Each structure stands twice: as structure tokens, then as C-alpha cells.
Image (cartoon, rainbow, N blue to C red):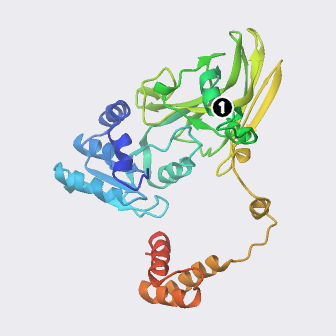
Amino acid sequence: MSYADVIGQRSMAFDLTRNRAYAAAIERAVTPDSVVLDVGCGLGIHGLVAAKAGARKVYLVDTEAVVHCALEVAQRNGLGDRVQAFQGRIEDIELPEKVDVIISVFTGNLLFSENLLPALYAARDRWLKPGGVLIPDAAQLMLAPVSAPRAHEESIASWAEPHLGIDFSSLRRFAANTMQFRRQSDFHPQFIAAPEAVVDLDLMTTNAADCDVSVQVGAALDADCTGMLAWIRMRLGEQWLGTGPLDRELHWTPGFLPVDPPIPVRRGDALSLSVKFPAHGEYTWQIAAPAGRRRHSTFLGQIRSLADLRKLAETFVPTLNERGAAASDVFAAVAGGRNNGEIADALFQRYPRQFANRQAALEFVRGIVARYAD
């Protein structure tokens, strides 16, 4: 499902629990003089709530074309005269004026896991008036060691069971190094220790786009630790909204960071929990207990050849393959003022191994133009 499609926006547009909490904060913040920015708006539910609450002007910004559907909805609801839509990155958009309120959903599932926060900071620093309001304006990352034997069995241990007489156990390591996002209704872990707020962000002032945190906790029961559960809390005006297992279910979900094999712990054991979410990098997590230590990384959960790994090195000197050369030709042709059809004709003639027909070349050109051209 893609956020570029209307149907892909449904879970967010109709998330009643989340949207009611946002609406309450918006209605408290908005006055008849307010100018509001809904950044990463999708179908614009929060910006439209602001317009309905009486905001003088609402700017909707999203990278996907669904923002134009949001404008259509605004017009249908009699709000079109106060709502303006922009498609593009907030870093590239020129708004007509600064704003009093910025609404965002850039906390994502786990604050750092989708690399969304820098866009919020860019919007805040460039467009929010002094004394303006962010919704949300604070967020926390929560962490707890858990015992979830059923989830571990289904997603990890099951790889060790032969299937039709075939042994897949060598692939178990990939599952053990994959962070899982699980709906609360399908996942009922037992807390081994009380949850800890390992990250506490003031979104009005911070520029943090990654985290590297550790916390010490004491085991409250005897259990097999199968991993850690991570989730977020965000402050919307006077209310905190969470995505943890004890919260009402939202379209956002908590993350399960498994360990394999599970670690037996006893009541009173000291546990050390570490999580690292680097910006645009791989996630690493570790649990240390008297009975052992486990360290996992999403880097190890991916299938990569040695040639692929070499390309990631800072010292690697890349050269263009034929596909890359074709893309380079497209950029040069765009700069030279040629139209899509002319560029496709040239590509089809020059790179017959890359493009089975002219239509394939044209689709290649259209993909690049849609993303990079004005």
C-alpha cells in the first residue's frame, strides 16, 4: 500500500482515536486570526479540522499528489476559500506567509524510524512565527523488555522447523535481525520490567534526528526475554497520545525488537537495554542480562552481496552502469530543453539492451521527470 494512493491514506484519515486527539488540540490552538500549516498532510484531515475551527488560512503540504484530493475535499465542505494546497517537500515549498500553528504527523511509528523529523524541524525553523504552536510539541520513545513467546515462535523459531522435509534454519538469522511492527490487537507481550522513557524530545527546540540510548532496569518476574518493545507517546496540547500495548489502537504501531535465542531472566536481575536509531542508517539493539547478552541489527537482516556492501563504503569510487548512463542522459536532455518523447527516442536508439521498446524508454523518462523536473 502506498501513501501516494487515496486508499493508502485511509487508515490515517479515518483513525478516529488519533484524529479526535489532534482535533481537540487544534480547536484549542486555533483562533479566527490563525494561519495554519499542515505539513505531511496526506488527505488533509487535520488541516481541514483547523479550517473548520475557524482558522483564517490553512496551507496543506505533502510530497504526494493526494494533497490535491485534500483540496477537493476542502472545496466540497465549503472550506476551499481558506485552504491552499502545495505538492512538494516542505524544504522546497514557498508559503505566502509565516504561520501561527504547525500540525504534523512526523513522529511516525518510532520517532526516528522513518527519518521524518528533519522535515518537521525545517518547517518549524522557517515558517513558525515566534510564540507559535506545534501540534504535537513533545514526544517520547518508550522501551521495555518483554516476554512474547508466541510471537517469537511464529516469526523466528518457526524457521528452524523443516517444511515439506526442507531445512530453512540457516535463514533464521534474518528474521532475528528484523524489527517487527505489530498491531496491539495481535500482540500481547508480558512486561519483564516497567517501561522507560528513553528519549524525551521538546519538538519546539530540538534538532535530534537519531538516538543512541541505554537504560538499566530490574526484572520484575521470572521469564524468557524474547526482545524489547518500543513505542511512542506524543503531546497534543493538553493530552498525551500513545501507541503502546496498553493504549487504544492507532494506525501507528509499536515496534518489537526481537532477540534470539531468548534470554532467561530471574526476578531482580539487572538488565541493560540499548537501542541505536541513526538517521538514514540501520537500527541496532542489545539486551544484556546475567544469563547472557544478545545484539541484533537490521543490517544483518538484509540480504546483501559482497559487491553490494563494497558500494556502501565511503572510499568506494562509483562508475555508472548502462542504466545509470541512461539516467544521466535524461538529465542532460532535460537541461537542454528536449521534450519527453524526444528523450525517449534517443534512449531507445542508444540503449537497446535497457529498453525493449520505445514505450519502456518513455516510462523510464517519465519516472525521472516526475521526480526531478519542474
Q: Position of residue 42 (x, y in %)?
A: 37, 50
- In this view, 78 is above or below 193: below
Say what amino acid the circle numbered 1 marks: Ser
Q: Position of residue 365 (x, y in %)?
A: 48, 78
Q: Residue at x 76, y 17 (%)?
A: 264
Observer-nearest of 46 and 263: 263
Dot 1 corresponds to which residue? 158
Q: Position of residue 212 (x, y in %)?
A: 71, 38
The image quadrant that residue 199 belongs to is top right
Observer-nearest of 161 and 104: 161
Observer-nearest of 71 and 27: 71
Residue 247 visible somewhere in the drawing:
yes
The image quadrant that residue 146 belongs to is top right
Q: Image check: 49 left or right of 118?
A: left
Which part of the image, by quadrant, shows the C terminus? bottom left
- In this view, 114 is above or below 373: above
